[in-house]
Image (spheres, rainbow, N blue to C red):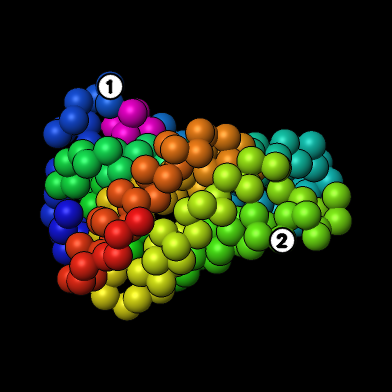
Amino acid sequence: MSVRLDAACLPSAADVLGAEHPVARAAELRRVVARQLTTASAMLAVAVTGVDLDGARLLGTFLAAAAAVEVCLVIAALAARASVRERARDLIADGGDVAVAEVAAECRRLVDGRHRARLAVTLGRALAGADQWHALPLATRPPPSVLDLAPHRATIADVIALLRAPDTASARGVALLDRLLRGGYAAPLYVARQEEVGRELVRIRLLLTAAAGRAGPAN
């Protein structure tokens, strides 16, 4: 999967995938919330421009309400942006079309070294939790299902090494791992069946290995 696409030159998800596609719907919600936030910010700026202390007292209730609305819209905008990214990552993980603006932008974020490093740390902590589970204090133990990762130790170590390699650029492989780890202790890594997790880890390793241009060891 190529990630060298300029999102600004690509059509939107709605144009390619249809307005009802999850990525397109999330992107439209993001646009709507962004417009509302811009409007609210402009109104608040106009309201406070040139207002003296007495005016601020008179408009206090309005200004407080407007500020509260703006805070809510900022939170909604962040949530909408996260939703677009999550839907795009799911599409990438499933091998979907990357030649749309929202998906191409997410491809670049996925293969960014900092994002891959964060995933490597998260996966490493999960494996450490499996290895040290019995020695950890009860309050800090991950779910017992983490012990199912132990048989996949070699595959996990390979995935972590590949994530940290500078030439690893499989957006799909990283997206699959992102989905496997997404959700904290409710993530598929912890709640899916052991054989399913193993198959997914092997698939991720194969994709990352292919992107790095070297053969991976057998599991």
Image vertical order of residue 52 relative to residue 60, above or below = below
Mark 2, secondary structure of its residue = helix
Quadrant of the frame with the C terminus: bottom left
Front-lying residue, 174 or 24: 174
Give the residue pinned by disc 1.
20
Mark 1, secondary structure of its residue = loop
Residue type of the residue flagged with mark 2: Gln
Q: Residue at x 40, y 63 (%)?
A: 159
Q: Residues within 10 Å of mark 2 (few under 14, many from 20)?
A: few
33 drawn magenta:
no
Q: Overall secondary structure of the magenta stretch?
A: helix
Please indicate whether residue 148 sits to the left or right of residue 5 in the image: right
Image vertical order of residue 101 relative to residue 154, above or below = above
Give the residue pinned by disc 2.
132
Residue type of the residue flagged with mark 1: Glu
Q: Residue at x 19, y 26 (%)?
A: 18
**Number of dots carrying numbers:** 2
Please indicate whether residue 39 sits to the left or right of residue 3 in the image: right
Q: Residue at x 79, y 37 (%)?
A: 61
Q: Residues within 10 Å of mark 1 (few under 14, many from 20)?
A: few
Q: Residue at x 51, y 33 (%)?
A: 193
Question: What span is colored magenta in the figure?
Answer: 22-28
Residue 72 lies, in percent from the top left, at 63, 38
For the question of whether residue 82 can be seen, the reply is no
